[in-house]
Amino acid sequence: MHDNAKLIETLVQSDIYKDYERAFSDATGLPVTLRPVESWQLPHHGRHHENRFCELLAGKSRACSACLQVQQKLSETATHEAQTVVCPTGLCDTAVPVRLGEQLVGFLQTGQVFRKKPSEAQFQKAAKLVAEWGVAAPTNEVREAYFSTVVLNPREHDSVVMLLTIFAQHLSLITNQIAIQQQNSEPPVITRAKQFIADHSTEDLSLGQVAKAVNTSVFYFCKLFKKATGINFTDYLSRVRIEQARNLLLNPNLRVSEIAYEVGFQSLTHFNRVFKKVIGQSPTEYRSQLAHR
């Protein structure tokens, strides 16, 4: 299994994510965060457009605990589609799953908004909670922060969730490319091995052949490769072949069976199974999706 936190960190550092984050925040006035599945931090704290009310609460452990319970609920419910959860003070957070094939690797998240204008009674209830949590800010400051929170009507909120969902799907498509790219400085032997794999991936390639090509023992190479890439040799080779197959699927004149053998799979059944595991859909479904874009 690939190191999900490492993969998410690589995605966060990518230009495509940074551009999206900037555009989304500027267009909506809301924070957006990409986080791994297992995360014990406040997702929007310190982010551009962080809600002022939430910022006031972030310094108190009891308030943080309540927020983290909301994040845990999102982690449990947003595994297949977007979910929105309301926190004890009435604000909403939304998470959309990001996947690597069939595997959940993280969430794209926004929130700290109201879905309808808050009432005075709602504020009084929130203010009482805030006081119990030990937040020392003056009541007028808490009030101003609370009522300056962004309010989205149902249609606006649905549109924001749709923007997140579309981008999460896009991120899911590029996670496989990132999974087979160099993520940190790596030993020269691994760089050479990757090049050898790329040059011979369509052949019946074995771990022993690659180890021999880079002058290492099979045992040493196996350990080193897993440590450097986060996945084992077989999975890496499969991902390289699947990337080649995705390019060939753009050609409508090539049959799926031809593509499977062209990229190095010895069995169409095995190709279909690996493709779905890596990409999250069958080669036929993937090609059909391309045709409708």
Image (spheres, rainbow, N blue to C red):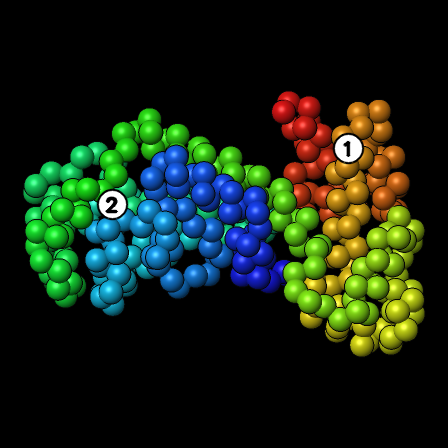
Q: Are marks 2 and 1 in contact (CB under 8 Å)?
A: no
Q: Is residue 208 visible?
A: no
Quarter of the figure with residue 94? top left
| Disc on the earlier residue, 2 or 1 | 2
Q: Which residue is mark 1?
A: 249
Helix, strand or loop at disc 2? loop
- Disc 2 target residue: 91
Total count of labels: 2
Quadrant the N terminus occupies:
bottom right
**In the figure, is residue 67 to the left or right of 276?**
left
* Three-letter amino acid code of the residue under disc 1: Leu
Is residue 89 in sight in this rendering?
yes
Residue plotted at (92% across, 67% down): 213
Judging depth in this view, the residue of 149 and 279 nearest the camera is 149
Q: Residue at x 49, y 57 (%)?
A: 36
Q: Secondary structure at mark 1?
A: loop
Residue 263 at what x, y percent from top left?
85, 44
Residue 30's x, y, as percent? 34, 42
- x and y, in percent, of residue 200 in the image: 90, 53
Which sits in the foreground, 14 or 223?
14
Answer above or below: position of 54 versus 158: below
Residue 162 lies, in percent from the top left, at 44, 32
Residue at image coords 82%, 70%: 189
* Quadrant of the rendering where the C terminus is positioned: top right
